[in-house]
Image: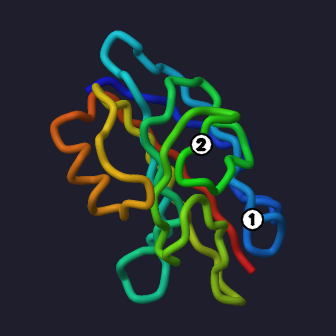
Amino acid sequence: MKELKVILPVHVLPAAYTCDGENKSPPLEVHGVDNTISRSLAMIVNDPDAPGGHGFIHWIIWNMELVSIIPENIPKDPVVTFPISAVQGANSAGKTGYRGPCPPSGSTHRYEFKVYGIDTFLDIPPGSEKEVLVRAMQGHVVQFGETNAQYGR
């Protein structure tokens, strides 16, 4: 499996990308996308520190076009055509699209941004949950990279 290098411009998320601000998705750089083996990108953003021990999915998005920059403020629509083409699923709050970090007061949580190069386009409906995306990706992940950020209140 070929590595992707995923870069967030910051290690501590500014409030604009959280529930304390505009709740918009942050920009990410994705280096090393190989269009000879990957046809689309997928991403899962998880808070492994969320209460309950199961994590909290902040964003799942797939069938993204092969880009080197995932721009900020992706619309929360199930199917996105601008500024990139992609399909989005349900976060742990049951809403479509990105949901910014909102840890309990007095705590700092880690946020994992995992990006996958997929050798096909996934045939799953918009609004699907993480488990459906993970099953659909099985056997199709040809590239992978991740980065982390923190946010505290």
**Quadrant showing the C terminus:** bottom right
Q: Residue furthest left?
A: 139
Name the residue: 44% across, 29% down.
4
Q: Nearer the viewer, residue 72 or 50?
A: 72
Q: Earlier in the sequence, mark 2 or mark 1?
A: 1
Front-lying residue, 13 or 56: 56
Could you say where residue 110 lies in the image, as x and y percent from the top left? 55, 66
**Seen from this angle, which residue lies furthest top?**
36
Residue that label 2 marks: 80
Q: Is residue 61 above or below residue 90?
A: above
Residue for badge 1: 23
Name the kind of residue labelled 1 in the image. Answer: Asn
Q: Secondary structure at mark 1?
A: loop
Q: Answer with the quarter of the image where residue 24 lies.
A: bottom right
Q: Quadrant of the N terminus?
A: top left
Q: State left or right for residue 36 relative to residue 98.
A: left
Q: CA distance from mark 2 to mark 1?
A: 17 Å
Q: How is the image coloured?
A: rainbow
In the figure, residue 23 lies in which quadrant?
Answer: bottom right
Apparent side of residue 92 relative to residue 122 in the rendered image (left or right): right
Q: Residue at x 68, y 47 (%)?
A: 74
Count residues near mark 2 (Cα–Cα under 10 Å), then give few for <14, some for 14-19, many for 20+: some
Mark 2 secondary-structure assignment: strand
**Residue type at numbered disc 2:** Val
Query: Few, some or many C-alpha atoms within 10 Å of disc 1 (few <14, some 14-19, many ≥20)?
Result: some
